[in-house]
Every structure is written in C-alpha cells, then in structure tokens.
Image (spheres, helix red, strand yellow):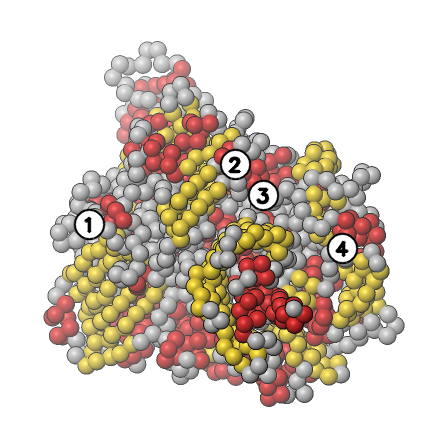
Amino acid sequence: MLLREVEYAKPSSVAEALQILASNDGARALAGGQTLISVMKARAASPDALVDLAALDELRGIELAADGTLSIGPMTTYTELVDSAEAKARPILAEVCAQIADVQVRNRGTIGGNLCSNDPTNHLPPLMVSIGATMTIAGQGGERVVSADEFFLGVYLTAVGPGELLTKITLPAGKRDAFAAVTLGVDGTCIASAAASLNGSLRIALGCVDATPVLVEPASADEGAVREAVRGAGLDPPADVHASAEYRLHLSEVLAVRAARQAAERS
Amino acid sequence: MGSTTTIAPEKVEIQAPQTPYKGQNVPRKEDRRLVQGQGVFVDDIKRHGMGYIHFVRSPYAHAHITSIDVSKAESMKGVFGTLTGEEVASLTDPFFQISSVPGGNIKDYALAVGKVRYVGEAIVAVVAETRELARDASELVEVEYEPLVAVTDARHALDDSKPVLHEDAGGNLMWSGVYEWGDLDAAFAEADKVVKIDELHFHRFNSTPLETDGALVEFNRGVGQWTIHTNNQFPGFAAIMMGPAMRTGIDKLRFVTQDIGGGFGNKITSHPQLVVCCLLARKLNRPVQWTEWRTDFHMSMSHGNERWFHDTEVAVKSDGTLLGFRTKALDDAGAWLRYEPLGGVIWAQVTPGMYRWRHIRLEFTQVATNKAPVSPNRGYSRMQHLWFTERVIDIVAHELGLDPIEVRKRNYIRTEDMPYETPNGCVYDSGDYAQMLDVATDLIGWSALEEKRLDAAARGKLLGVGIGSTLDSGTNNFAQSRMINPELQFSGNNEVATVKLDIFGEIVVTLGTTPQGQGHETTAAQVVADILGCTVDDVHVRSGHDSYWNSHAGFSGTYASQFAVTGLSAVKGATDMLAEEIKRLGSVILGGVPVEALELAEGTVRIKDNPEAALPFMACGAIINANNAGLPDDLDVTLNCRYVYRPPFQVPDIERKFGNLTLTYAAQVHAAVIEIDPETGYYEIVDYAAVDDCGKRINPQIVEGQVMGATAHGLGGAMHEVFEYDEEGNLLTPNFYDYHVPHALDMPPLKTGFVESPSPFTPLGTKGMGEGGGAAIHAVCAAIQDALRGNGDAIVWDSSNPYRRVWEMLSSPDTAGGRVSVVDA
Amino acid sequence: MILQGERIFDAPRATVWQVLSNPASMAATMPGVESFDVHDERRWTANVKIPLGLGGLKMKIDMDKTEERELEYAAMQIKGQGVGAMMNMVTKFELSDEGAGTKMMWSADVKIAGPVGSMGQRVLQPIVNQQVQHVLGSLETQVQDALAAGEKA
Amino acid sequence: MSENAAALSSSRVITVTVNGTVYEREVEARKLLIHFIRDDLDLTGSHIGCDTGNCGACSVIVDGTLVKSCMLLAVQADGSSIETVEGLADGDELAALQQAFSDRHALQCGYCTPGMLMSATALLRTNARPTEAEIKKGLQGNICRCTGYWNIIEAVALAAERTRP
C-alpha cells in the first residue's frame, strides 16, 4: 500500500509511449501492473514515472497465421489467452495461463508483463524458452527480434532496454508441449517448474532455479536422458523458505522428466 | 449424561425458527450489514482533521540505536509531528510485567528505547495528513544503528556466547517452572517400555486475521480522556496495561469497537501501539489514525508460541497403556513478554490431553529471542501441548507396533469417569471421546482404508491416515497466573450483560464482549428471546463494545473460548432479572395477580390461565420510563438489568500447581487422509472429518462454522503457514506472498460430525468453543507418519510439514525424521 | 547469504593487487555507480543505482578495508543504505600465483534487510549473484586496463 | 480522455462511475484504486487485507471485469464504471448471493465478504450454473480466514440455483 510519488502518462500510440520512455530515464512501462504495482507497494522498487500501455490497442490481440504461427500482443491478458480460439493452436498457452494465480490477476495480468518482469517464479518465461518463442522489441530507432533464449537477462531484467517496449511475442506452431510445477498450494507460486517442448528436438526450460530460465536439451524424452541433461546443467538453485537448493535441484529433475513425458505423450 | 450424535448433518433449507430458539440455526443478525459492506471496521472510521500514523520500523533484529533524527521528517509539508522512544520513555512508565523475575525485570515501552530487538520493531511514529505522506516522511527519519548478533534459535538462547536481549533481566531466561504430579519413579518402575524422544518442535505461526490491527484515537483535553476506536479484542487487558503506563485512570481510556475482522487471539496485544496513538493524539491535539498493514502485522504482531520438547520419556505398558511422561518444554517468547509468560501455565489446563496417565513432569523454560513477540493465537499454549501429547501417542504406537486408534481408545478418559479430575486438579466436565473417535473414523470410511491405500499405491501415491484428538478448554480461572507469579492478584473470571426494556418496548442487550465473527448478537438474542417469550427480531443486541455502556468487567472481551459460557450466562442472568421485573410490574398493573401466575409470551406479560389479560412489553417500558406516577413505593423495578456472571472457581494451590484452571472442556476428534507424491513430497488431503463436542449448541450452524474455520487454520498451520526466520533474524514469510494460507482450492473435502455432552457446570449446558485445539495439525502429522510407514519410517517431529520437509523425511529419514528409541524398563 | 568462488586473472599479482587496493578502481566496479568519494586509502563512499528492471535501487555504499596483507589478502566491510534496503557485506579476497597469472579466491557474506529483504530469497539470491558477477566482470576490466596502462608506461 | 493524457504528471482529474454515481476527483497518480474508493469516495465496504495482492478483500468489478483494486492505480480507472459491494442490493432487497451468504452462514467476521461477493457475482455472470470446482476456482483470489470456505462455496451454489433462469 502507499506507493512513493510517481508520475503517470497514458499515451495513445506506441510511438508516443516510446518517446516518453526514451526521454525519461526513470520511466517504466505499466502493463497489467500485477507485479509492478505490488513491488511498488513494498517500495522495493520505485520508478519515477509510469507509462500506462492500456490505451495501445496495437499491443493487444492474438493472430494465427496460416502456418500456425501465433503472434500475441504483449498487452493480451491471461484471461484473453485462456478464452482465445486462436491461442488454442498452441494449447499449452491456455493451460498454463489458467493456472496463474487467480481470476482477478488473470483478468489484469498480461503476457508481456509476465515476461518483462521475469520474476524467477513466473510461469511464462520458461514456457517461452521451451517453445522457442521470439520477442519483438521496439525502440525509437526501430524494431529488433530476440529469441526467448536471449530475452531474459536477470530478475526483473530483460533485453527490453531503457526506452524500449516489447511489442510482439511470436510462437511457432507446435502442440507437443507440457508444463509441470510444484506450487505453493493449488495454483500458487511456483516452487520449481519445468516446461518441455518436443516439436522437433526436445527443449526443456527450468524455472525458479536461477535468475533466468535454464534451457536443457536432452537427446531424447527418455527419463535417463532428461535426468542426465538436467544434472549436466550445473544448476545452483537459490534456497528459500519453501525449498532448499538441494530440494529445488531434485524437483527440477523430477519435473523435467514429467514435462518431457507429457510432451512426448501428446500428438 | 445423555449424549446425542449426529453424523455429518445434511444441509437443510433454513426453516423459520421456532421457539425455543436455543438449538436453532437462527440466521445471524450481523449478516445484513456485513453482506452490504455496511459494517464499521476500524479503518472505516474518519474524523475531521485526523492525522495518519506510520511507524518507522527496525530493519535489524538486534542493534543499539545510536541516534535518531526526525528533523527532516518533521519539516516535510503535510507532516503533523512525530513520537520517538525517548519521548515515550519520559511520558510513560514501562508496561506492567506479568512475569516474576527474571522476565519481570524487563522494561517494555510502546516504542523501542535505545535498542531494537526484532525486525519490524517500531522505533518512531510519524503523523501526516495523508497515509501516503506519513509513509514518505517515515523514510526521512534517520536512524543510526550498531548491529548486534541476533539470537534466533531458542535452543541456544541461554548459551554464554549469545548476547543478552534485556540487560535488566540479566540473561535471556524469562521464566521457568517445574510441574510435577503423581509418582514418576513408580510409573517408570511399573512400565514395560520407556519410549524416548529426543526432540519435538512446534513451529511459529498465527491465524493472520484478514483485518490487521488499527485504531482511531481522539483526546478530549477538557476532561483528559481518550476515546480509542479499535479492534483490540480484549479491552479489559489493554486498559490494565495502558492505564498505569500512561499514568492515568482506567476511565480515561474509553474503548469502542464495532465490527472486528477476525481476531483469533492475535488482536489482544496491541496496547503498545494504542499508547503511541494516545500520546500522539494528545501531543498533536488532533485525532490520529493507525492502520497496520499486512507486512507490519507479520513482522511484529502476535506470533503463536514456538515450543520445543526435549528429552521426553514415556512410561508405557506393552499393551499400550500409558502411565506417564516427563519432558522439558522450551518456549520461544520472541523479543517481549506482551502476554507471556502466561503460556507457561495455560498449557496445564490440558495437562494429560485426553488420556488417563496420572504421572507427569514438565519442566517449562521460556526464553527471549530476536523475533516478534508471541501472544495468544487460537488454541493458545494448549495447542502446543496437545500436539505434544498427540505426537507422543502416535510415536508410542509406531514404536510398539500398535494401532494408534487402539492406543487412543485404551487410554482415553472414559465417559463414565466424567467429571474427571486430572492429575493437576483440573476437572473435565463431560465428554465421550471414544464415541467421537468412532464417529470420525466412520466419516472417513475407516473400514475401507486398506483398499484405498492399495488404490493410492497403484497410482504411485502413499496414503496415510491420522487422528488428532484435542480439547478446547474454555473460561479461564485467572488465578492460574499466580503459578507464573505468586504476587499477581488475579483470580476467577467474569463477564457482564445488560438487558433493558426501553420506553417503546425495545429490548436492548449490551454485551461486554468484542466479537470478531462469532455471532454474539445472534446467539445472545436467541437466549433472550426464549426467556422473554418474544422473537429474536424483537431483541436488539448492540454491536461491539463501548466502555461507556458500563456493561463490562475486568475480564471482558472475546478470547479463550468462553462466550457460550461467560457471555451467554451473563445474558441469561440479566434476562432472568428483567423477566422477573416485568412480572412484578405486570403483577401490579394486572391487578395484583401473584407473580407465579404470570408468564411472558408473545411480547407480553400475561396471566397463564387467562392469556387475554396481557400487558404488552411496550406498555411495561412506557410505564417505568415515562408514566410512573402512582406506582407502589416498594416496586423496585428499573427494567434495566445488569448482571455479572462469575464462574465457580477457587484459587488453586499455587505451591503444588494444583487446582481447576478452566470451567469447560469442549473436545475435538479429527481424522485426515492424505496422499503423498513420494517423488516430490507434495501431498494432498483427500478426505477429512472433524467431530466436535461442545455441549449444548445454541446455534449449531455457528458452531459448525467455528469447527470448519478452526480446521482450516489447523490445515494451514500444518502445511504451509510458518513464521520462519533466517540466522540474522529476518522474517522470511513477511506477507501472504510467502506465508501461504489456505485458499478455496486448497480446502479438502470436509465432513463434520457432532456429539453433544452438556456441561454440568454451566447455566445453559454450553461449553466454550472455537479454538479447536489445532486438531488438524495433529491429524496431518499423524497421517504423514502413517504414509511414511515402510517408506523410510521417519518420525514426524515438527508440526510444520511443507512439501520440502516431507521430501526430506522420504529421502533421508534418519536425519530428517525425529530420533526416537525404546528401552525395556 | 554467502557467495564464494575463484577467478583467474591473466595478469601478475602486483597488477591485481594494485586494482584491489585502489579505492577509485574498486568503486568503479560497483553496479550502476553514479558517483564516488574517496576518503582515504581505506575508506570510500559510492552512490549507486543498482539496475533492477522495475526501477533502480538507489544506495549509498560505504566501504571500509578492515584487513590487508600486501599482495595476498584483503577484507572489506561494505555497508549500503538506501530507502527500502540495507545491505551489509563482508568480502574477502585472497591472491596467489597461478602460472603467469593470478588466482583470486573470493567470498562475500551478504545480508540484506528492509522491504527489499522481504521480497524473498529466490528473488534476492539471483539478484545478488548477478550483481557479484557484475563486480567480478568489472574487476577483470579494471585489471586489464591497469595492465594496459602499465604496458604503456 | 483528456488531451494531456500522454503528458507525465503526478496527479490528474479522473471521472469514474461507481454503482451508478459519477464522481470527478483529482487524485495523485500514486494512489491505489482501493484507497481512492475507501478514503476519497467514502465507500468503505471494500476492504484491505494484505499488501501484496493476495487476499482479494478489495475486489471490485471495473467495466465488467473482476479486479483487485489494490493492484490498480486510481488513474488507471479513469473513465470506467466500477461496481462495489455497496451496489449489489436493490434498495432493501438483498441480492441472491447476499441472501445465500447469510442463509448458508458463509461469513463470520464479514471482512472478506464484500470481496468474496464481488468475485461470486463476476463468476455467476459468466457461468450461471458453476460446478463446485468452478466455484472454488472462481473464489481462489479471495482469502477467508474464518469459514474454511465450504459454506461460501455452498452459498454460491445456492444463489446459482435460486436464480436459475
């Protein structure tokens, strides 16, 4: 409760938003706010200014291309993803979004906000890494496209630099995905998570074990191969009240096996 | 004694209540305002020109304060002023200490003075014209610290190498006492086996009421009186603490409450913050408001007592007959004794648990640590001890290869032995524990459990079942505080109710209690309506507490499972008086018919044999209040009756620590069925039964609501809720993000059942209830241990069992499980 | 939280030592350093804005070298104070020859308090790890710069 | 939308409709919607039970969407239509959910109740006959510390049954 003083603007175009972000060093984009506002309430982080993206319809919506590629506007909420007919093209998206927090948070929280906040417990960063999504980032100088592997840089830190915005998330076609997690209570915060994608080679991204999702690429979805790959990743997970480093390490392995198995069982 | 049983009552449509109202599911009178958002909770109250308080809190668990500079904060625009510990120390005296020495020597003020002793301790209060500005200004207060080593593990608090929290106490020992009853040597000589348990740990958590603490305080300079709008749940205690400290009379502290958003004991010890509010209201000459935010609450308020049990030895016969035990209880009080060390005796209300062992020795030691102060929490101090007795039963059964159900039945106190005097002189009033256990095991389909276990195994899950059988001792005899400190002059208990018949015939009930959701307005109205022969809608029960109503006594409040006894007995007493007065008035007005010939019915006093001859209550109220000329001189009737209920207590033998400590003993038997995923330690409760016996139930629906709520608290405590600190004394679960309480999806299927054993000691046959003894924690611990049978066979030694601990017990049972041994005696 | 590790510098011990014992170059290793003030050879103060994606965390950092053995060992006490966070860190460096280069064993005992401290270890620990990696990376740069400067001279 | 919406400012004038009443107020940009509703508009039915967006006591419906009003700035709600617990009853007539909450003893202290009712209201609007599992999922964002949830779940089911079209 009781945020520090902050300035606020609600631009009506991406260009306008970029201009404000670029000319105000301490400005941050405000998407759904379900992480940012919470952190500001604790006064743990306090941007000088918030640029509310709510009016930017260009950043909303889900498009399904003929080849199965999904383009998602970062301001699309979890609820919209869960309800979207187009998003069913990649079924895992709605499945995972439906497990995030609760109705109220899903109604406000956005896919872009989830990715850009990159809290290590978030569901979507490992999911995006496992399915090999790409992110389009716009700045005043133009656009660039970054793979999910390179997008996440640290806790609350991504490739979206000062003066930039995430403008699109692109998911290739594919259905053989799975997500496994041990959470703090049902639909709670992830204690450890693993997202697997077996559309071509197997990609497993582990959540909650480092500042960014850790990608492992086992030779196959066989339990032995998956375990070996996770063990070979040199994980050094953080310890907290919910899990020791050892327990997280163990969970990562178990969840990777489960996610890989579920992905392999899908057609 | 007649007991009736209802198993898992089917929900039925609420029917129009019939008289008698007692025993009916009368819809709650409170609901109409609460479902419309029209309740008045403390943060809803506003006053013109009020200032908002924000506390500067310590980031260190243990540090000297070398300097405090409030000048920048005070010069900020919109800031009304500040209050520092130094000012508090000059304006007030330290709070009265319940403890004998050494704990009794500590000096406790409303703000930290010279030193901080836990993360989140309040150091300075800042007042500004908005909440936001107050917080902004609090960031401008400059405090310099000299950090000290923190004491965070009670087991090492008394080590010479550890720093001392309170120099005045000369060490970290706050209180200790030895309790021994029976003949331990004889019991261990008679035993076939001695089961030894090195260590058991009951963790720190609390009930986290959804509304946190708060107050709005006004100072009337002319008469020197403060009006304290607050959600403190035990104003009588707050007044006793605050008056002497503030060097003022009790009547200068007017406490007002209305709706309180949950209490569970956690809202008893807000007196330090209330003192700060009072001092600031006077200093700044304006109303001041304080709302505690969630993180503040977690860091600083009312943690439940954390307790260790060391070197436990249990004397037992080969057939599982329990003879006695000895143990050493080590209680972690946190940084201050705000209600402590009462926990050092409260446990003794349930010394033997539900069992017949007669030889018991418990050495109790309470120490100070650099953590938030503990205070009562639903099941206060008995929950810890009952968890201990339940763990002992299940560990003994496990070690001797006996069925825990059989061990319980063999050792339960028998219904034919009720009322039963415990080894320490407490009297269990009534109950049939074995029958309750049967009801509980039936509800979870005990006979089919082995099939379910196989089914779970086929799905790769470990199924376990556990029982928790507990007591909810209600209505304290406050003389037990003398076992802590013989110099204290408290004993007995009391509660007040005033019932009047007003000028237009309104029946107005004033309670001394401070309900936080227990439905006192409704149950009180049921009792009154039955006596006065009117409807519950005719009875207006005032909401909340106001010391100006003069309907309270020293122990007034809502805590310690007692309303159904103290509150309703006071209501009954006052209403009986009023009924008698109405009849005496009726006797005069109806032409001198004898009082015995009159009855109260349909809102009238009337002649039994001639109901047509009736005087409406409205007429009675009007006559006495506004039309009284010509009434007989000797008609001593006011129609405004105040009654103080005083339970029948004696002062116990303090030397022997022997005597009756509580009036009633409600009982709970819970049964939990869980399934563990052995790969991850993740587990779910797949079936659950809660059976309760609280004697006569005035409003069964309200009783069942308390049972279900207490169960949810127990399940939360068993699985995820813990106030965990790191070695530096940082609280790792400072809000609901990491302190996970049960949400709707977390709640398992819940079946309820009842046994009704009326209390022979209370006017209505009721027993206090609501705390529930933490039965769910015991049941879950036992179920986990059962599930681990043949899978490492770890002994569950901690009351907190998040997934990580279950996994640790599965993966390294020797180190993660408790150490237990059995020796032949 | 205790972090430790070792790092090999492709530079002689004297150069590494020179960097470690130069307050100006050490201050420059702090993440998001905005300004610094050298009081004497043992004490300096830096104003930093640690980059967190959700908004920078401003801190005033005081460093005090508490112990040193020339070319071998240094211990520093670092205290950070910001709105919302207090940091206490004891960090130790131990140098030894590793071929032509230098091996540095380091450890840091970091304590964080205040609202930021309440964010949870699984968030904080990766943040601290990452900042420590930043310091070590900057140190590497400083050593290389010192080496280059030495060669030039 | 005012023409200077794109300019940074630390406060602005907003217009919201709450339970049918239009309010125009100047607010600081930092003010949370819940503080605005409670402190500025004096609608104290919506409550605050946490500071991390976990408890849902502040749940309100903004333009038809259930949100936690502590996870939203008041300025973000500019131009919107907000429903709070105070708007549920029709005069003296309780809404079906309110009546069912009382009938099923779905509240004790009543502190979580307004938020719980708003979540249940939003649920029944999109799903008139929810299953038990759907009700639990729909109430997952609201913490109750008194009841253990089951009576609330039953109350929502009862209200759904009573209002069956």
The residue that mark 3 highlights is A2
Other residues around mark 3 within 10 Å, as few (<14) / some (14–19) / many (≥20)? many
Q: CA distance from mark 4 to mark 2?
A: 34 Å
Q: Amino acid at mark 3?
A: Leu
Q: CA distance from mark 4 to mark 1?
A: 68 Å
Q: Residue at x 54, y 38 (%)?
A: B137
Q: Residue at x 21, y 67 (%)?
A: B326
The residue that mark 4 highlights is A163
Q: Kindly identify which chain the residue marked by label 2 belongs to.
A: B
Which secondary structure lies at badge 4? loop
The residue that mark 1 highlights is B483
Which secondary structure lies at badge 1? helix
Q: Residue B428 got which mark?
A: none
**Picture quadrant of residue B805:** bottom left
- Tag 4 or tag 3, which sits nearer the N-term? 3
Mark yes or no: residue B448 visible. Answer: no
Q: CA distance from mark 3 to mark 1?
A: 46 Å
